[in-house]
């Protein structure tokens, strides 16, 4: 079971790197709040997702992400990648306590990529 979790964690990390590289040209995309408030919707979404994560409301946070996600907005794509990266960095116990799994992280990341028109094939 531990090896399976490690494998899924690595798969998620590789998906995050892949998406970050093809969309932003860097290995890891970490969302940073805009300085002049020009990206208000993305900033607001990011803050709300972080608040929900801190409360352990992972499912609610993911639902909000999919509800508000605009695949044409690269800032929101960065919000989504950042969100799944943060989830992947959480420990297994926290995920389990809050009814979420690593497999769900991988599926959500693939779904976001698909909404953005990026098809990820398994090798």
Image: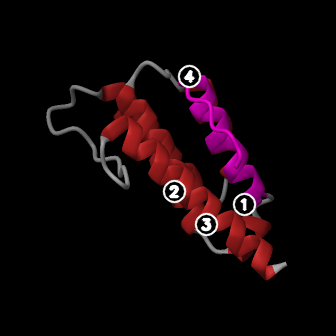
Q: Which residue is mark 3?
A: 10
Q: Secondary structure at mark 4?
A: loop
Q: Can you tell which quarter of the image residue 11 is in?
A: bottom right
Could you tell me residue 44's position as x and y percent? 40, 34
Calculate the distance from the C-alpha at mark 2 to the C-alpha at mark 3: 11 Å
- Image quadrant where one finds the N terminus: bottom right
Q: Earlier in the sequence, mark 2 or mark 4?
A: 2
Q: Is residue 56 above or below residue 62?
A: below
Which of the two marks, 1 or 3, is nearer to us in this view? 3
Q: Which residue is mark 1?
A: 102
Calculate the distance from the C-alpha at mark 2 to the C-alpha at mark 1: 11 Å
Q: Earlier in the sequence, mark 4 or mark 3?
A: 3
Extent of the magenta region:
100-123
Q: Which of the colour schemes (rainbow, by chain, secondary structure, one colour) is used?
A: secondary structure
Circles 2 and 1: CB atoms closer than 8 Å:
no
Q: Earlier in the sequence, mark 2 or mark 1?
A: 2
Which of the two marks, 2 or 3, is nearer to us in this view? 3
Tell me the crowding category of disc 3: few under 14, some 14 to 19, or many 20 or more residues within 10 angstroms, Cα based.
Answer: few
Q: Secondary structure at mark 2?
A: helix
Q: Which residue is mark 4?
A: 117
Could you tell me residue 70's position as x and y percent? 49, 21
Circles 2 and 3: CB atoms closer than 8 Å:
no
Residue 1 relative to residue 17: left or right? right
Q: Is residue 30 magenta?
A: no
Q: Secondary structure at mark 1?
A: helix
Q: Which residue is mark 2?
A: 85
């Amino acid at each position: 079971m531990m090896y399976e979790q490690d494998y899924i964690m690595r798969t998620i990390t590789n998906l995050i790197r892949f998406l970050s590289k093809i969309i932003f040209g860097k290995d890891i995309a970490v969302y940073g709040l805009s300085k002049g408030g020009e990206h208000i919707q993305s900033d607001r979404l990011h803050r709300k997702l972080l608040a929900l994560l801190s409360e352990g409301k992972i499912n609610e946070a993911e639902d909000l992400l999919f509800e508000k996600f605009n695949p044409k907005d690269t800032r929101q794509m960065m919000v989504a990648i950042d969100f799944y990266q943060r989830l992947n960095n959480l420990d297994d116990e926290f995920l389990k306590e809050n009814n979420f799994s690593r497999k769900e992280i991988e599926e959500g990341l693939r779904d976001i990529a698909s909404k953005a028109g990026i098809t990820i094939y398994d090798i």
